[in-house]
Image: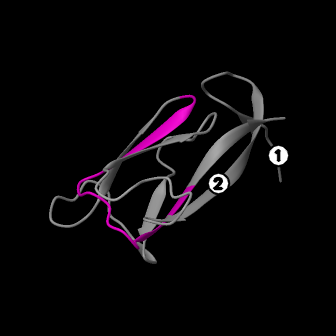
Amino acid sequence: GGSGAIVNPTTGTATSLTGVFVQFRIGEPGALMIEGETVLTLTYDDPINGTASVDLDGIELPQDDNFQISYTVSYSTTTMVITFNQGVINNQLYQIRFLRFIPL
């Protein structure tokens, strides 16, 4: 067997990975969105492109599906922007998971 290092392709530095879990319910104090909004910006260094998944009330949402509620994601080195194709509604529970690089 072999071993290898993980390198952040953006910075070229040795790194590790960590999972991020974000949960909130629309309409509750501290929720990251309010009813009717469609855009959520999460500020985390080095989110990994393509790793986000979003659950709504325990069901995984599809990406970029115009026939039902879905979302698209754009990534930068310091943020991840999730755009829903419908406004969020009070009492909906959102759970978001993604990976990010962390420096060693």
User: What residue sits right under mark 2 in the picture?
Assistant: 20
Q: Residue furthest bottom?
A: 58
Residue at image position (15%, 65%) is 67
Residue at image position (68%, 39%) is 101
Q: Residue furthest front?
A: 29
Q: Left or right: where does residue 27 sit relative to residue 48? A: left
Residue at image position (62%, 28%) is 9
For the residue pair 58 and 4, the one nearer the viewer reads as 58
43 in magenta: no
The image shows residue 68 at horizontal and vertical percentages of: 20, 67
Q: Are marks 1 and 2 in contact (CB under 8 Å)?
A: no
Calculate the distance from the C-alpha at mark 1 to the C-alpha at mark 2. 25 Å
The image shows residue 32 at horizontal and vertical percentages of: 50, 53
The image shows residue 21 at horizontal and vertical percentages of: 62, 59
Q: Residue furthest top?
A: 11
Judged from the image, the secondary structure of the residue bearing numbered disc 2 is strand
Against 79, residue 39 (above or below) is below
Segment tinted magenta in the rendering: 77-97
Q: Give the residue type that dot 2 points to.
A: Val
86 in magenta: yes
The residue carrying pointer 2 sits among few (fewer than 14), some (14 to 19) or many (20 or more) residues within 10 Å by Cα, namely few
Against 16, residue 31 (above or below) is below
Quick one: quadrant of the N terminus?
Answer: bottom right
Judged from the image, the secondary structure of the residue bearing numbered disc 1 is loop
For the residue pair 60 and 9, the one nearer the viewer reads as 60
Quick one: quadrant of the C terminus?
Answer: top right
User: What residue sits right under mark 1 in the picture?
Assistant: 3
Residue at image position (79%, 37%) is 5
